[in-house]
Structures are given as C-alpha cells and as structure tokens.
Image (cartoon, helix red, strand yellow):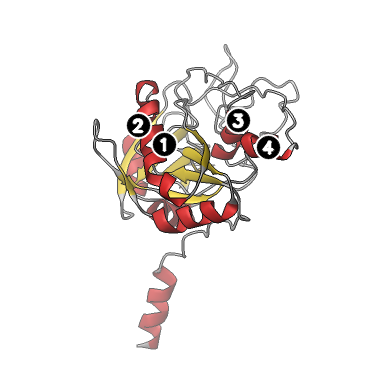
Amino acid sequence: ARATMTAMEEEAPPPPPQEEELPPNQTLYIRNINEKYSKKFRLEELKAKLKAIFRPYGEILDIVAMSNFYNKGQAFVVFKDVASATKAMNGLQGHTLSLTSVGGGKEMKIKYARSKSDVIAKLEGTFEPRAKKTKALPPTGKKVKKAKAAESGEGEMEEDAEQMDEDDEDGGDKSKGNAHGGWQAPSGQNQKSAPPAPVHTGPLFPHPILFLENLPLDITSDDVAAVFSPFPGFKEVRLVPSRPGIAFVEYESDVQSGMAMARLQGHRFGELQTKIAFSKA
C-alpha cells in the first residue's frame, strides 16, 4: 500500500506557482476581465461599470482601461487612500464583472498594483515624467499604439499591466525577438532551424494562456495539442504564422495552466527543448 501511495505522490502534479505578495497601494490592478470589454468603443462603458462597483468603498481618483494588445482584459482603479483600496479588494475579490451590452461576465482577480499611480504621485508632489519606451510588436504582427501618459497616468499603468518586465537590451541585434522574447529571423535569412530560445527575465503573473517558444518551425497545432490537451481545463492552441517557433496554449484558469507548465517545462519536440511561460497579455 505504501508503494502504491508513493507512486501516486510521484505522479501528483506540483502545486501551482504562488502569486507574489505586493505591499498595500492606493491603486488596484484588476485582471480576468472579458477581453471583449476592452474594445475601444466599449471602454467608457467598462469604466462606468467599474466606477459603479468600486465607488461604495471610497473616493476614486482615476480608472484606467486600455484597448491595446498588452492591456486588454485588465484595468486599474485608483483610490484616494490605501484603506479604501484594501476594503474594495477584499470585498470584490471574485466578483463577476459583466457589461449589459455584451454579457459573458467573468470573476475579477484583484491585487495591489506594483507601483504608485501618476495621479497619486502628482498629489504627493513626487511625480517625475518617464521616458517613453518603444513597444515590441505583439504576436499578431500589428504595431501597438502607445497611450499618452502625460496627464492620465496610463504610462505607469501600462508598465504594471506588463508586470513591470524589463526587456533585455537589443545591443543592435535586430534578429533577437518578438513581443514575448521568441526568436525571429531577419528578412532573407534561412529559417530551417531556430537558435536556442531566450529565457524570460523577471516574474510574470499567472495567466490562463501559456506562451511556448523554441518549438520546431514546422510544428502543427495538433502536435502541440497532443501534449497539452490531457491536462484539465485545456481550451485551444494558437500558432502565429508570422512568428515560427512559438505558440500559445489556453486553459480555463491560471491554476490549470500553471499545472501544465510545471509538468511540461522543458518538454522536447524532436531535438528542441520547449520553454514555457505565462503569457504577458
């Protein structure tokens, strides 16, 4: 019986990664919002809905929601004081956010933002403008439109939404990366084989979507699904034709994607060892 239990313990998946504990902040970071709500023409409706939900917990100074690739499905609510933000986070954790015009509500996941919002910094007299950063291309190949940050404080919010990941300096090598760090050959270069995939730097928040890199350039979605679909909550595989060697695998929750990542990190497709990380978007 003990041998059987030991075998079961060895087969049991490791616990999902724990989210980082962040210090109290007036600004709350909200994710797991239905991405349909992040369409440009629905942003005002989304902000109004968030204001109505969060207003009973204290004075709100700002609400930020954006429609670009990296920030869809996320929002920030800035309270005047930390106590109000804490009450709102505890009171609304897991609350279903749904827009009447769209439906498809999802349970909000709320935590403190990583850094102080521009609105608070201006009130405290500590605001310092930041240099604008050039965004990488998203996996769709479309350019990310930068939101103006001077008055709205959205510049800091964008950094939070990307989990404050600092990309490595390119050093002039234009063949290095795509939006998620995957390899991209320069135009005209033979793409028969890809070099070892770079490793993600800095922690990422758990996310239902996994980002896979260092895959064979001729891999199919069926090849990837055959490996990832046995895990609970599997939904779909998405390849990016313009970015060979990478893929996205979506699960129903970040807990389920975390279990799959923990078990399949380093899985080999042929001779290549797969690198897996939570998606930034």
Q: Could you tell me the amino acid type at mark 4?
A: Leu
Q: Which residue is mark 3?
A: 153
Pick whichever of labels 2 and 1 is earlier in the sequence.
2
Q: Is residue 269 shown to the viewer in this render?
A: no
Q: Is residue 71 above or below residue 263?
A: above
Q: CA distance from mark 1 to mark 4?
A: 28 Å
Q: CA distance from mark 3 to mark 4?
A: 12 Å
Q: Which residue is mark 4?
A: 123
Determine the residue positioned at 63% across, 56% down.
23
Q: Nearer the viewer, mark 4 or mark 2?
A: 4
Q: CA distance from mark 1 to mark 3?
A: 18 Å
Where residue 73 is drawn, which disc sits there?
1
Give the camera-side residue of 241 and 56.
Answer: 56
Pick whichever of labels 1 and 3 is earlier in the sequence.
1
Determine the residue positioned at 42% across, 26% down.
240
Picture quarter with the N terminus: bottom left
Image quarter for residue 80?
top right
Q: Which residue is mark 2?
A: 37
Where residue 277 is drawn, which disc sits there?
none
Judge left or right: residue 94 versus residue 102.
Answer: right
Pick whichever of labels 2 and 3 is earlier in the sequence.
2
Q: Is residue 136 shown to the viewer in this render?
A: yes
Give the camera-side residue of 251 and 57.
Answer: 57
Pick whichever of labels 4 and 2 is earlier in the sequence.
2
Q: Could you tell me the amino acid type at mark 2?
A: Tyr
Q: Nearer the viewer, mark 1 or mark 3?
A: 3
Pick whichever of labels 3 and 4 is earlier in the sequence.
4
Crowd class of label 4 (few under 14; some 14 to 19; many from 20; radius 10 Å): few
Residue 241 location in percent, x, y?
Answer: 41, 23
Asked whether the residues under the numbered discs 2 and 1 touch, taking CB atoms below 8 Å apart as contact, a structural biologist would say yes
Q: CA distance from mark 2 to mark 1?
A: 7 Å
Residue 110 location in percent, x, y?
Answer: 46, 50
